[in-house]
Protein backbone atom coordinates (compact mmCIF):
# COMPACT_ATOMS: atom_id res chain seq x y z
CA UNK A 1 0.00 0.00 0.00
CA UNK A 2 1.13 3.56 -0.70
CA UNK A 3 2.66 5.09 2.46
CA UNK A 4 0.68 8.34 2.16
CA UNK A 5 -2.58 6.44 1.71
CA UNK A 6 -1.75 4.13 4.64
CA UNK A 7 -1.05 7.12 6.89
CA UNK A 8 -4.28 8.80 5.74
CA UNK A 9 -6.26 5.63 6.48
CA UNK A 10 -4.88 5.71 10.03
CA UNK A 11 -5.12 9.49 10.56
CA UNK A 12 -7.69 11.21 12.71
CA UNK A 13 -10.90 12.19 10.98
CA UNK A 14 -9.95 15.89 11.10
CA UNK A 15 -6.51 15.27 9.59
CA UNK A 16 -7.95 13.03 6.89
CA UNK A 17 -10.59 15.62 5.97
CA UNK A 18 -7.94 18.35 5.81
CA UNK A 19 -5.91 16.23 3.36
CA UNK A 20 -8.93 15.76 1.11
CA UNK A 21 -9.87 19.45 1.27
CA UNK A 22 -6.49 20.31 -0.25
CA UNK A 23 -7.47 18.14 -3.24
CA UNK A 24 -11.02 19.50 -3.48
CA UNK A 25 -12.54 22.26 -1.37
CA UNK A 26 -16.04 20.75 -1.15
CA UNK A 27 -16.45 19.78 2.51
CA UNK A 28 -19.21 17.25 1.86
CA UNK A 29 -16.97 15.51 -0.70
CA UNK A 30 -14.03 15.44 1.74
CA UNK A 31 -16.19 13.99 4.52
CA UNK A 32 -17.60 11.37 2.13
CA UNK A 33 -14.08 10.36 1.10
CA UNK A 34 -13.01 9.98 4.73
CA UNK A 35 -16.08 7.87 5.48
CA UNK A 36 -14.87 5.38 2.85
CA UNK A 37 -11.65 4.58 4.73
CA UNK A 38 -9.77 2.35 4.58
CA UNK A 39 -9.05 2.66 0.88
CA UNK A 40 -6.59 0.02 -0.31
CA UNK A 41 -4.82 1.64 -3.25
CA UNK A 42 -4.57 4.53 -5.69
CA UNK A 43 -7.07 2.95 -8.10
CA UNK A 44 -9.61 2.59 -5.31
CA UNK A 45 -8.96 6.17 -4.19
CA UNK A 46 -9.50 7.50 -7.71
CA UNK A 47 -12.69 5.49 -8.19
CA UNK A 48 -14.05 6.59 -4.80
CA UNK A 49 -13.23 10.22 -5.61
CA UNK A 50 -15.14 10.05 -8.89
CA UNK A 51 -18.10 8.28 -7.31
CA UNK A 52 -18.35 10.78 -4.46
CA UNK A 53 -17.90 13.74 -6.84
CA UNK A 54 -20.79 12.39 -8.96
CA UNK A 55 -22.99 12.56 -5.85
CA UNK A 56 -22.28 16.25 -5.27
CA UNK A 57 -24.58 19.05 -6.32
CA UNK A 58 -24.40 22.72 -7.17
CA UNK A 59 -23.69 23.98 -3.65
CA UNK A 60 -20.79 21.51 -3.32
CA UNK A 61 -19.43 22.47 -6.73
CA UNK A 62 -19.58 26.18 -5.90
CA UNK A 63 -17.81 25.55 -2.60
CA UNK A 64 -15.01 23.73 -4.45
CA UNK A 65 -14.76 26.43 -7.13
CA UNK A 66 -14.38 29.13 -4.45
CA UNK A 67 -11.14 27.43 -3.33
CA UNK A 68 -9.44 28.17 -6.66
CA UNK A 69 -7.75 31.42 -7.58
CA UNK A 70 -8.81 33.08 -10.78
CA UNK A 71 -6.66 32.06 -13.73
CA UNK A 72 -3.70 34.43 -13.64
CA UNK A 73 -3.97 35.09 -9.90
CA UNK A 74 -2.04 33.36 -7.15
CA UNK A 75 -4.35 32.52 -4.25
CA UNK A 76 -8.05 32.09 -3.60
CA UNK A 77 -9.51 33.50 -0.39
CA UNK A 78 -10.69 30.08 0.80
CA UNK A 79 -7.73 27.92 -0.24
CA UNK A 80 -5.48 25.97 2.09
CA UNK A 81 -1.73 26.49 1.80
CA UNK A 82 -1.37 23.14 0.01
CA UNK A 83 -4.18 23.95 -2.44
CA UNK A 84 -2.68 27.38 -3.12
CA UNK A 85 0.73 25.82 -3.83
CA UNK A 86 -0.82 23.33 -6.23
CA UNK A 87 -2.74 26.14 -7.97
CA UNK A 88 0.50 28.09 -8.50
CA UNK A 89 2.08 24.98 -9.99
CA UNK A 90 -0.95 24.20 -12.18
CA UNK A 91 -1.12 27.77 -13.49
CA UNK A 92 2.64 28.02 -13.98
CA UNK A 93 2.27 28.87 -17.65
CA UNK A 94 0.67 32.22 -16.75
CA UNK A 95 4.01 33.38 -15.32
CA UNK A 96 5.40 33.27 -18.87
CA UNK A 97 2.37 34.79 -20.59
CA UNK A 98 2.36 38.14 -22.34
CA UNK A 99 0.76 40.97 -20.38
CA UNK A 100 -1.88 41.40 -23.10
CA UNK A 101 -3.01 37.77 -22.68
CA UNK A 102 -3.14 38.14 -18.90
CA UNK A 103 -5.18 41.31 -19.28
CA UNK A 104 -7.65 39.50 -21.57
CA UNK A 105 -7.91 36.65 -19.08
CA UNK A 106 -8.52 39.11 -16.23
CA UNK A 107 -11.26 40.81 -18.25
CA UNK A 108 -12.75 37.44 -19.19
CA UNK A 109 -12.66 36.30 -15.55
CA UNK A 110 -14.78 39.33 -14.64
CA UNK A 111 -17.25 38.69 -17.47
CA UNK A 112 -17.45 35.03 -16.52
CA UNK A 113 -18.14 35.73 -12.85
CA UNK A 114 -20.76 38.32 -13.73
CA UNK A 115 -22.46 35.95 -16.19
CA UNK A 116 -22.32 32.73 -14.15
CA UNK A 117 -21.79 33.80 -10.54
CA UNK A 118 -18.70 31.72 -9.86
CA UNK A 119 -14.98 31.57 -10.65
CA UNK A 120 -13.86 30.28 -14.05
CA UNK A 121 -12.56 26.75 -13.42
CA UNK A 122 -10.37 25.04 -15.96
CA UNK A 123 -7.90 22.21 -15.51
CA UNK A 124 -4.82 24.35 -16.14
CA UNK A 125 -2.24 21.57 -15.91
CA UNK A 126 -0.31 21.43 -19.18
CA UNK A 127 -2.22 24.33 -20.74
CA UNK A 128 -0.78 27.62 -21.89
CA UNK A 129 -2.34 30.95 -20.96
CA UNK A 130 -3.41 31.29 -24.61
CA UNK A 131 -5.25 27.96 -24.43
CA UNK A 132 -6.98 28.91 -21.19
CA UNK A 133 -8.07 32.22 -22.72
CA UNK A 134 -9.50 30.45 -25.78
CA UNK A 135 -11.39 28.02 -23.53
CA UNK A 136 -12.67 30.91 -21.42
CA UNK A 137 -13.95 32.76 -24.49
CA UNK A 138 -15.74 29.63 -25.73
CA UNK A 139 -17.28 28.91 -22.35
CA UNK A 140 -18.65 32.44 -22.06
CA UNK A 141 -21.14 31.38 -24.78
CA UNK A 142 -22.59 28.58 -22.60
CA UNK A 143 -25.80 28.96 -20.65
CA UNK A 144 -25.43 28.73 -16.87
CA UNK A 145 -26.64 25.12 -16.58
CA UNK A 146 -24.23 23.88 -19.25
CA UNK A 147 -21.38 25.90 -17.80
CA UNK A 148 -21.97 24.64 -14.29
CA UNK A 149 -21.70 21.05 -15.55
CA UNK A 150 -18.56 21.84 -17.56
CA UNK A 151 -16.96 23.55 -14.58
CA UNK A 152 -17.84 20.57 -12.35
CA UNK A 153 -16.16 18.28 -14.90
CA UNK A 154 -13.05 20.46 -14.83
CA UNK A 155 -13.06 20.34 -11.02
CA UNK A 156 -13.25 16.53 -11.18
CA UNK A 157 -10.13 16.49 -13.39
CA UNK A 158 -8.33 18.85 -11.01
CA UNK A 159 -9.16 16.77 -7.94
CA UNK A 160 -7.91 13.62 -9.65
CA UNK A 161 -4.60 15.31 -10.53
CA UNK A 162 -4.28 16.61 -6.98
CA UNK A 163 -4.97 13.20 -5.48
CA UNK A 164 -2.09 11.89 -7.60
CA UNK A 165 0.21 14.66 -6.33
CA UNK A 166 -0.87 14.03 -2.75
CA UNK A 167 -0.06 10.32 -3.02
CA UNK A 168 3.57 11.00 -3.95
CA UNK A 169 4.35 13.64 -1.32
Image: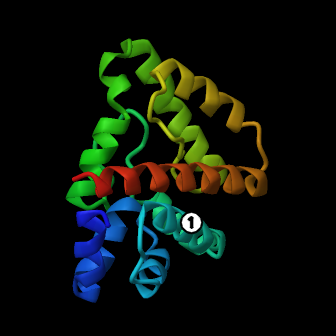
Q: Residue at x 46, y 17 (%)?
A: 101
Q: How is the image coloured?
A: rainbow
User: Where, by quadrant of the figure, is residue 23 drawn?
Assistant: bottom left
Q: Position of residue 53 (x, y in %)?
A: 58, 68
Residue placed most toward the observer, 78 or 150: 150
Q: Residue at x 59, y 65 (%)?
A: 50
Residue at the far front: name it: 1
Please, what secondary structure does the residue beneath circle 1 have? helix
Q: Position of residue 158 (x, y in %)?
A: 48, 50
Q: Is residue 40 above or below residue 14?
A: above
* Drawn side of residue 6 relative to residue 156, left or right: left
Figure label count = 1
Q: Is residue 102 above or below residue 13?
A: above
User: Where, by quadrant of the figure, is residue 1 drawn?
Assistant: bottom left
Label 1 packing within 10 angstroms: few (<14), some (14-19), many (20+): few
Q: Position of residue 156 (x, y in %)?
A: 56, 56
Q: Residue at x 20, y 57 (%)?
A: 81
Task: Name the residue that disc number 1 marks.
Answer: 47
Residue placed most toward the observer, 43 or 100: 43
* Drawn side of residue 1 relative to residue 40, left or right: left
Q: Residue at x 46, y 67 (%)?
A: 45
User: Where, by quadrant of the figure, is residue 33 drawn?
Assistant: bottom left
* Drawn side of residue 49 relative to residue 85, left or right: right
Amino acid sequence: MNAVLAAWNAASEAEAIEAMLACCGAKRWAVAMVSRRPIADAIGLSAAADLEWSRMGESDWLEAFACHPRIGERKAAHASAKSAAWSRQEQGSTALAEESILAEIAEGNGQYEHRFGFTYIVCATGRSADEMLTILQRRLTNDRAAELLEAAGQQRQILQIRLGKWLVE
